Image (cartoon, helix red, strand yellow):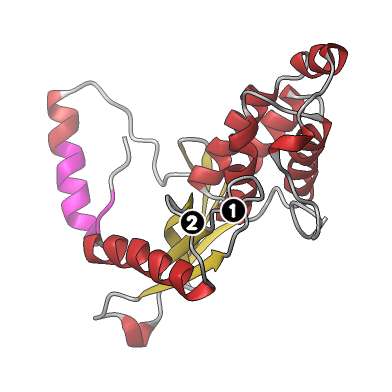
């Protein structure tokens, strides 16, 4: 599950509430979602999405 | 490779196999599943191959060697650009506004079989594409302006939703 928000505290509260009801793990900052790699540069305020892994997988799948 | 399909390569129905032997040859390639795999990349982070996917998906049922060659070229393009993706960037002076830009274009009579035109638009949010589409127009446009009005309509509908 991916949590997005512009307030860290609210996210933290939601996380605690969720984990009190459900058995779940906190994997920290998201790196991958649906096969897309997320790269962030907080100082530059940039966010990249790419599918390098997926492209490599399909290249292999079709022997390219 | 810098572009998925070299300029000047055009695909049309005439290129489909003429003899049974050719047809048998082409039935061995995994065209549909290759196009499907590429389509997933296009839908997620690769609007740059959207035009090619639109063209290639038209030949699912009757494909010739030329069509398969283009699939391979798209794969080769992806191999060279596998780290390409979308980049979103916040700018301090735009903190309070929603930074959306939309672009449209049209490929007049780009479809050589039916002479339909292709509409395309992309909407950028904070510098990265969030919504894009390439679609063959449903009627034949007699002039570039007519085709452009159609793409502008498509894009405006999307813009209203955004």
Instruction: Give the farthest residue toward the front.
Output: B142
Task: Give residue B133's position: percent from left, percent from top.
Answer: 45, 54
Figure quadrant of the C terminus of chain B:
bottom left
- Looking at the image, is B46 positioned above or below residue B38? below
Q: Chain of mark 1?
A: B
Residue stretch rendered in magenta on the structure: A4-16
Task: Give residue B117's position: percent from left, percent from top.
Answer: 54, 58
Residue B94 seen by the camera: yes
- Looking at the image, is A36 positioned above or below residue B20? below
Residue that label 1 marks:
B115
Q: Nearer the viewer, residue B100 or A20?
A: B100
Residue B131 painted magenta: no
What residue lies at 12% left-to-right and 25% top-to-bottom?
A: A21
Residue A6 painted magenta: yes
Residue that label 2 marks:
B140
Residue A42 seen by the camera: no
Quarter of the rendering containing residue A15: top left
Q: Residues within 10 Å of mark 1 (few under 14, many from 20)?
A: some
Q: Chain of mark 2?
A: B
Viewed as shown, does residue B116 lie left or right of B9?
left
Provide the secondary structure element on which disc 1 rests. loop
Q: Magenta-highlighted stretch: main secondary structure? A: helix
Viewed as shown, does residue B73 lie left or right of B46?
right
Q: Residues within 10 Å of mark 2 (few under 14, many from 20)?
A: some
Quarter of the rendering containing residue B56: top right
Mark 1 in CB contact with mark 2 (< 8 angstroms): yes
Task: Give residue B109's position: percent from left, percent from top.
Answer: 60, 59
């Amino acid at each position: 599950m991916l949590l997005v928000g512009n307030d860290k505290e609210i996210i933290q509260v939601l996380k605690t509430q969720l984990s009190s009801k459900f058995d779940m793990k906190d994997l920290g900052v998201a790196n991958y979602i649906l096969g897309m790699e997320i790269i962030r540069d907080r100082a530059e305020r940039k966010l990249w999405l790419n599918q390098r892994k997926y492209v490599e997988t399909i290249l292999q799948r079709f022997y390219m | 490779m810098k572009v998925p399909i070299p300029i000047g390569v055009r695909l049309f129905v005439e290129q489909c196999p003429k003899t049974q032997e050719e047809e048998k040859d082409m039935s061995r390639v995994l065209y549909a599943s290759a196009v499907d795999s590429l389509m997933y990349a296009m839908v997620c982070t690769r609007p740059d191959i959207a035009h090619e996917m639109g063209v290639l998906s038209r030949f699912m049922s009757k494909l010739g060697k030329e069509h398969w060659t283009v699939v391979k070229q798209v794969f080769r393009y992806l191999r060279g650009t596998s780290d390409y993706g979308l980049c979103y960037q916040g700018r301090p002076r735009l903190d309070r506004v929603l930074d959306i830009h939309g672009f449209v274009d049209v490929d007049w009579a780009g479809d050589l079989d039916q002479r339909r035109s292709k509409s395309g638009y992309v909407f950028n949010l904070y510098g990265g594409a969030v919504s894009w589409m390439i679609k063959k127009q449903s009627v034949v446009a007699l002039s570039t302006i007519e085709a452009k009005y159609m793409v502008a309509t498509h894009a405006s509908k999307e813009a209203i939703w955004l």
